[in-house]
Amino acid sequence: HPTASEVYDRVRSHTPDIALATVYNCLEALVEHGAVRKVNFERESSRYCPNLQEHGHFHDSKTGVIHDVNFKKGTQLEDFLELPKGCTIDDLEITIRGTVHN
């Protein structure tokens, strides 16, 4: 779940002349074409997620690591959310914050 700045830092080692704006434009093109998802965590920079399946995120407040959280097979949102009758869900963003204890 890198930010555009993190992608830029990685790319610069191979392409030192690349501009940060180019990285932003490429990431936005990937989002527009459905190749990655843009996710936002409160006031942090946007992050980019290659997992296109419906899923949530667990943000480890101690390490800053973001983990994908998949729904158990057969689980429907209606099983744990009281949604308005007749609604259609177009997008889903669930973020859980906590700490991973090893």
Image: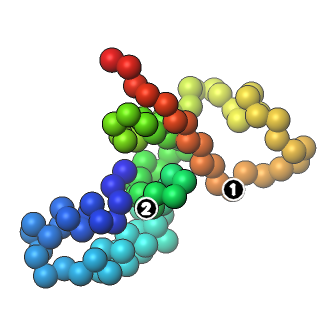
Residue at left 12%, top 74%? 15
Q: Position of residue 21 (x, y in %)?
A: 32, 81
Whether residues under marks 2 and 1 lie with C-beta atoms below 8 angstroms apart, the answer is: no
Tell which tag, 2 or 1, sits nearer the viewer.
2
Q: Position of residue 1 (x, y in %)?
A: 37, 51
Residue at left 55%, top 36%? 96
Query: Residue 26 vs residue 43: left or right?
Result: left
* Relative vertical location of residue 51 with respect to residue 6 in this rendering, above or below: above
Picture quadrant of residue 29: bottom left
Q: Secondary structure at mark 1?
A: loop
Looking at the image, which residue sits at the far right? Answer: 85
Regarding residue 100, the answer to whether it shows in the image is yes
Count numbered badges in the picture: 2
Q: Position of residue 32 (x, y in %)?
A: 49, 71
- Quarter of the image with the C terminus in it: top left
Query: Residue 100 vs residue 20: left or right?
Result: right
Picture quadrant of residue 66: top left
* Marks 2 and 1, how far apart at CA: 23 Å
Q: Position of residue 7 (x, y in %)?
A: 26, 63
Q: Secondary structure at mark 2?
A: loop
Q: At label 2, which amino acid type do we have?
A: Ser
Residue at left 69%, top 32%? 76
Looking at the image, which residue sits at the far top? Answer: 102
Q: According to the image, label 1 marks what residue?
A: 90
Q: According to the image, label 2 marks what residue?
A: 45
85 or 24: nearer the viewer? 24
Q: At label 1, which amino acid type do we have?
A: Asp
27 or 9: nearer the viewer? 9
Label 2 Cα crowd, 10 Å radius (few <14 / some 14-19 / many 20+): few
Regarding residue 33, the answer to whether it shows in the image is no
Residue at left 64%, top 54%? 91
Picture quadrant of residue 14: bottom left
